[in-house]
Structures are given as C-alpha cells and as structure tokens.
Amino acid sequence: MHTQLFPGIDWVGFVDWNIRDFHSYNTERGATYNSYLIRDEKTVLIDAVKKAAADTLLANVRELTDLEKVDYIVCNHAEQDHAGAMGQVVAMMPNAEVVCTAKCKEILSGYTDTTGWKFKIVANGETLSIGENTLTFIHTPMVHWPDSMFTYVAEKKLLFSMDGFGQHVASSQRFDDEMPLDVLMEEAKIYYANIVYPYGAQVARVLEAAAGLEIAMIAPSHGLIWRKNIPTILEAYKRWSAKKSENKVVIFYDTMWESTEIMAKAIYEGVMSVPGVVCEMHHVRKSTLTELSTSAMDARCCAMGSATLNTLPTPTSAAVMTYMQGLRFPIRYGLSFGSFGWGKGAVEEISAWFEKMQWTEVVPGVKTKWRPDADVLQKCREAGKLLAEKALED
Ligand code: FEO
C-alpha cells in the first residue's frame, strides 16, 4: 500500500490500528509509522518502521521498486518505532547506504548488530543530490533524542520532520485536509505534551532554522502529513515551545474512601469562586497519565491530593508525580492535600515533591483524619481560592 505525496515520492509506512500503549503513552486513536520512498535517479527510503511491521514496509516498497534498487536509507532517528525494522530492511536492500548522524549510527549499533552496514554519516546542513531532487540534512538534537535530524527536499519544499509535528492517529487518510483539524490538533498537543515538551528550547531552535525554509509540506513520521494547515501547526509549536502557562489550575487526586475526593471538590469550589480561571479536575485512577499530562501542560497551578496508603501516597499518585517530574511543565504554585487514618504520610510526600519541582505551596498541606469536617472543607475552599488567585498572576 502506498500514497503519493508528489510524483516519485510516496508514503510506504505502516498503520498500527490496535496499539493503545506506546511505552505508557495511551494511543487511543492508534498510531502510524511513516516511511517514504523517493524514486529519482537515486532511490531513497526515508525512515523505517517498528520491527513487527518490517514485512509491511518491504511489501509497500516492492509495489514501487525492486529492493535492490534502493541506494540510500535515510535514518532520521534511531528510536525503535522507526528503526526497529532496520535490521530486516538493510538485509533486504543490499545496495543501500544508511544515511544518518554520527549519534544515530552509535544508537543504531547499540540496538542492532550493524556489522557490514554501509554508513554515510552526514553533517548538519550537508546535501546529497539524488537527481532532480537534493536532500538537505538538518540536525535537530534533542528533538527529541540526541541523534535526531530532519531531511528537507528543497525542490518540493518538503520537510521530513521525523517525530516533530507528529500525532498518534491511525487512519486511512494521509493528509491533514482529509481529517477534522480539531482532532489533529488535539492529537498534536497530546503528542507534544508527552513526547516533546521537555525540549522546548531545542524545538525553538529548530523552528528558527525552519523559518528560513520554504515549506509546502511537512511529512512527519507519525500521523497525518501537513499540507494545508502548516501555519497552524507551526504556530502551535511556537506557542508550546515557549513553555508559557495559562490562567489554569489542575486538581489531581486519588481517593480510597472518598475523603480526599470530598476535599478535591471543596478546592474546586474555591478555585471557581475566582472569575477568569480555568480548572480541570481529575481522579487520577480514572484518567490516563497521557490525559493528565496534557491537562497539566499549560497549567500555572496544581493541587495534588492523595489518601495515605501505608504511610505514602497511593501508587497511582506516585506514578503521576514521577511522570510529571520528567515532563517539567511550567507550573509555579502547588497545593497538597489528602486524608489519613492512623499514620500520616501522603501530604508530606506531596509537599516534598513540590519542593523538588520548585513549585511554591500556597499554604501548608491541608490534611484530614478520616472524613474532612466543616473546618477542613473551609480550609480547602480558601486554599483553592488562593491557588486560583495565583493562577491569574502572569
Ligand atoms: Fe517516534 Fe522518537 O520515535
């Protein structure tokens, strides 16, 4: 199966309809691993797919050319969703050189036995003429791995952007104008929050470099190809990479016998007493880490609550904190809260986590033994109001 981008340039990737767990990222709409084939005087495969999809990729390429005719395999990124199939692909394309960064070669060789592979290591800005078209390699370190690069085809104003501008969406459509834009942008935001967010400074540098290119099409390695809404996705990346928070409070909590949930609802009441603040509240065991992180990405304040289980926050609360710690969202203020029975612990642990995150607690953690009484609930409302007022501070 293949789809034409331009005469001589086709999508030959794999649609992963059933994947729902992409190393903990919940891919509710599935995913694709996009590979592309350029048939010019030289024949070039741009990126591979995950190992299990190697046969599909090879069959898609065979529909268009003999595998022996492939001269180059460009590997923009060694992560295994794109390079897991490289072993099989290189073996079946014996005349091809693998074109990549030095770091990519190192990582490929860490995953796969690359003995006998012909590598062509390319520098940033290096070009490769393949006939009518010229490939330019643009190093994009830490967007989102150290090996990453984009490949640009000036003659077509076409940018192969690897993970950049990607979305996890399995579909029969290949182009952005064939799917509702709100769906695509929602998935692009989820992707950015969960994969790209920590690397905002590096993304900003890439966007600066891309500003000097004429771009008529962006072909990422996941999801739909951008040809109509390029300004929309570029503007979104510019906004997201600036790591600017909004007038938003997120309330995350886990509860055992509803006490912490009752407190969360009182905090919500306090937040909502302040006009102009957006609030999203999640029971962390009823949302995925993927949803929670996307909700927190542009929040300025976070209330984190948990029941105490064996002197600690619940395991799901701990997972949320670990995940958010890695993503480094620009939250500035926190509020810890929760319930305990005979042994305290959860709220203290959450406060210690705030300190590690360098988020300022608006008040000392709010705790209750067993059920929250009227005084505790009043404290929750007041703390929620304070948090909301902080959310209005730009
Ligand atoms: Fe889609 Fe970083 O791999």
Image (tube, grey):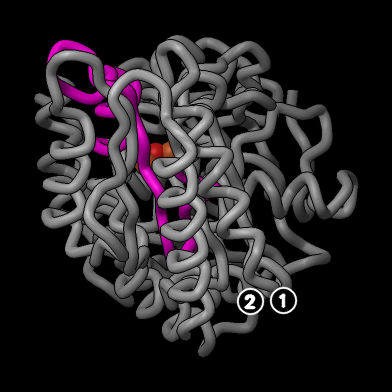
Q: Nearer the viewer, residue 116 or 216?
A: 216
> Which residue sits furthest bottom?
212
Q: Residue at image x 12%, y 31%?
A: 109
Which residue is label 2 attached to?
235
- Residue 391 against residue 305 in the figure, above or below: below
Counting other residues with Cα less than 10 Å from the Cα at mark 1, is it few (<14), some (14-19), or many (20 or more)? few
Q: Which residue range is magenta in the image?
A: 293-322
Where's residue 365, x and y in %?
A: 25, 48
The dot on residue 130 is none
Which amino acid type corresponds to the residue marked 2 in the rendered image? Glu
Where's residue 85, x and y in %?
A: 38, 21
Which amino acid type corresponds to the residue marked 1 in the rendered image? Pro
Q: Nearer the viewer, residue 348 or 341?
A: 341
**Some atom of ligand 1 lies within 8 Å of the CB belonging to the residue at label 2:** no
The quarter of the picture where residue 133 lies is: bottom right
How many numbered circles are shown? 2
Q: Residue at image x 42%, y 58%?
A: 383
Query: Would you say residue 73 is visible in this rendering?
Result: no
Q: Are marks 1 and 2 in contact (CB under 8 Å)?
A: yes
- Tell me the distance, in whole angstroms, between the alpha carbons under discs 1 and 2: 6 Å
Disc 1 element: helix
Counting other residues with Cα less than 10 Å from the Cα at mark 2, is it few (<14), some (14-19), or many (20 or more)? few
Which residue is label 1 attached to?
231
The quarter of the picture where residue 200 lies is: bottom left
Q: Is residue 387 left or right of residue 364?
A: right
Where's residue 306, x and y in %?
A: 33, 29
Q: Residue at image x 12%, y 54%?
A: 356
- Residue 235 against residue 54 in the figure, above or below: below
The quadrant of the rendering that contains the N terminus is top right
- Depth-wise, is mark 1 or mark 2 nearer the camera? 2
